[in-house]
Image (tube, helix red, strand yellow):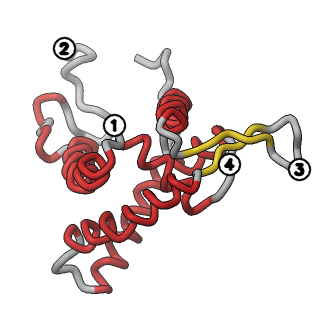
Amino acid sequence: MHGPDDRPAENGRSADDFELNAFFPYLVRIFYRSVITSVSRVYATRYGLSVSEWRTMAVLGVGGALSAGEIVERSSMDKVNVSRAIKALRERELLKRDIDGDDRRRAVVRLTDRGRDVFRDLVPLVTEVEDGLLAGLTQDERATLFGLMEKVRSNAEALPEPDKDAQ
């Protein structure tokens, strides 16, 4: 008789068949670390920015004045990382907090002049790294890669929440 830990899953795979080096989520994490390490060398070395600080600056550099919640939505970061990034960037005078002119109850953050200068300096450097990461891929291959990435992201968002009580 099989116990719950050694029975095949609905997809027919069991723990005995599991190969970490072929497990898609693991491969994505390895891929992510390689990519983010390549890019972060630029902004970490040049300005001492963390990943979340750069990502916050990038969202603001494109989006203008935004609330912390809007940065969370656009950045794929959680509230804690965004709050820490905002605090650190304000301390370094790379961004400032204002009251929204249209809604006096809403606080927004925006890049300072210095923050915009840093953003403008970094964009060509990080896009150069992006070019290096995608080197050797044709335009069609890039379009396919981005399309597949979007498909997987959409699939991930559509997955049902696991049932905590199912055993």
Report if the CB atoms under discs 3 and 4 are less than 8 Å apart.
no
Asked whether residue 146 appears in the rendered view, the answer is yes
Q: Residues within 10 Å of mark 2 (few under 14, many from 20)?
A: few
Position of 39 with respect to 104 (left or right) is left
Residue at 21 percent across and 80 percent down: it is 137
Mark 3 residue type: Asp
Q: Position of residue 25 (x, y in %)?
A: 28, 43
Q: Is mark 1 in CB contact (under 8 Å) with mark 4?
A: no
Q: Which residue is mark 3?
A: 102
Residues at badges 1 and 3 in contact (C-beta under 8 Å)? no
Q: Which residue is mark 1?
A: 10
| Label 3 packing within 10 angstroms: few (<14), some (14-19), many (20+) | few
- The relative height of residue 92 versus residue 150 in the rendered view (above or below) is above
Mark with earlier residue (2, 1): 2
Q: Nearer the viewer, residue 4 or 89?
A: 89
Residue 150 % position (x, y): 44, 63
Q: What residue does disc 2 label?
A: 1
What is the C-alpha distance between the residues marked 1 and 4?
Answer: 44 Å
Residue in the picture at 19% in, 21% down: 6
Q: Amino acid at mark 4?
A: Leu
The amino acid sitting under disc 1 is Glu
Tell me the CA gap for discs 2 and 4.
58 Å
Tell me the amino acid under the disc marked 2: Met
The answer to whether the residue labelled 2 contacts the one labelled 4, judged by CB atoms less than 8 Å apart, is no
Q: Earlier in the sequence, mark 3 or mark 4?
A: 4
- Could you classify mark 4 by the number of other residues whose Cα lies within 10 Å: few (under 14), some (14-19), or many (20 or more)? many
